[in-house]
Image (spheres, grey):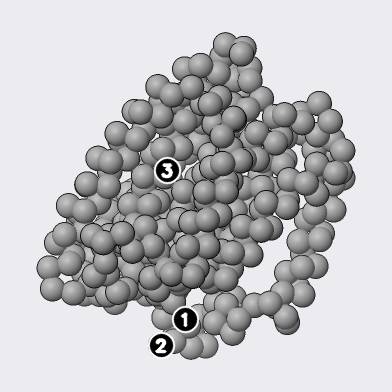
Amino acid sequence: MLYPISYNGQESGGEVSNFFLRQAVFAGIGLVVFIWLSFVDYRAFKSFSAVVFLGGIFLLLLALIFGKTIRGTSGWIDLGIFSFQPVEPFKLITVVVLAKYFSVNSRTIGEFRHILISVVPVILSVILILKQPDLGSAIVVLGIWLGMLTVSGVKKKYLVFLLLLGLILTLVSWNFLLKEYQKERLSTLIDPFADPLGSGYNVIQSTVAVGSGEIWGKGLGHGSQSQLNFLPEKHTDFIFAVIAEELGFAGAIFVLVLLMVIMTRLLTIARNSQDNFGKMLASGIVTIIFIQGAVNIGMNIGIVPVAGIPLPFLSYGGSSLITMLAALGIAQSVERRGKVSP
């Protein structure tokens, strides 16, 4: 996400009143990027995917070494008037790189070697992301790879093997890789009231906010949990809880419907594309929206551990918003040109 330099995890002074204006500026930039990319031939990205990937890795390294630390994560690059989070556009870069690899090797994609080769750049980037540390974004990048691998046509027995391997690695990670605070987040999922003022606080306040909205909500700007600051990160990680509290079940369903419409449209673009690269691009973009939407909403209602993943198009932050609009611009390019065989 793209945060103002003064942001420190808590609203101060007139900061809250400026969130909307700043997000509107980010949205304007994103719309310009969307329109521009919709007229660019998406197949051009196929030729520059390696350069783009190396650029993304460089930015991740830059953020890791010289990055500004926000909420315990050194994943932001200070650009003077705002901070830029490279991991957000890197998710889209991952889609481009994998789309090229899977489309170029589409005829032999059933071979297990393609799984091993395609996961190498993913593992490299995941290691850098975990070093920040940003477990949520690392999970998204891995999810993008797994989702696109599924669409690519890989044999089902290999997918089953990967799922079993993932389960084993998860069990091993608990003892050797996960930090104590990450274990607390998983434990909180089972019983948030075990530490109501500590690790369970965010989940408790979020679920209270969601439940208190009932059918029609308390009214825009009248949510007690959000407006009285009981709900943490209400403009970023827990924006869905604010929507559910102030606009109720009806507002929450409306958001879900909008996300479903976008994903359905992207799936249609992927299905209609006669170009494998375009098909994989659209499928990868769907994967980003689905994973981030599912995880963010899941952690807001207490069924997924808190992972610090933005809700697509809604969470405050320019890096995420501009990246998602850029992704839709690429998808629009696939729609405009992908029906014609190159």
Label 2: few (<14), some (14–19) or many (≥20) C-alpha neighbours in 10 Å: few
- Of residue 95 and residue 173, the one placed in the foreground of this image is 95
Q: Which residue type does callout 1 highlight? A: Gly
**For mark 1, does the 10 Å Cα neighbourhood hold few (<14), some (14 to 19), or many (20 or more) residues?**
many
Task: Return the x and y of residue 82 as percentages of the image width and height.
Answer: 27, 60
Real-space Cα separation, disc 3 to disc 2, in angstroms? 34 Å
Give the numbered dot on residue 200: 1
Residue corresponding to mark 3: 324
Percent across and percent down for residue 122 are 66, 53
The total number of labels drawn is 3
Residue 240 lies left or right of residue 27; in this view the side is right
Q: Nearer the viewer, mark 1 or mark 3?
A: 3
Q: Earlier in the sequence, mark 1 or mark 3?
A: 1
Say the numbered circle drawn on residue 144.
none
Q: Secondary structure at mark 2?
A: loop
Residue 184: quadrant of the picture: bottom right
Residue 71 visible at all: yes
Q: Are marks 1 and 2 in contact (CB under 8 Å)?
A: yes
Question: Which residue is under mark 2?
Answer: 197
The vertical placement of 85 against 228, above or below, is: above
Q: Earlier in the sequence, mark 3 or mark 2?
A: 2
Q: CA distance from mark 1 to mark 3?
A: 30 Å
Q: Residue furthest top?
A: 340
Instruction: Quarter of the image for the N terminus: give it.
Output: bottom left
Q: Nearer the viewer, residue 76 or 290?
A: 76
| SS at badge 3 | helix
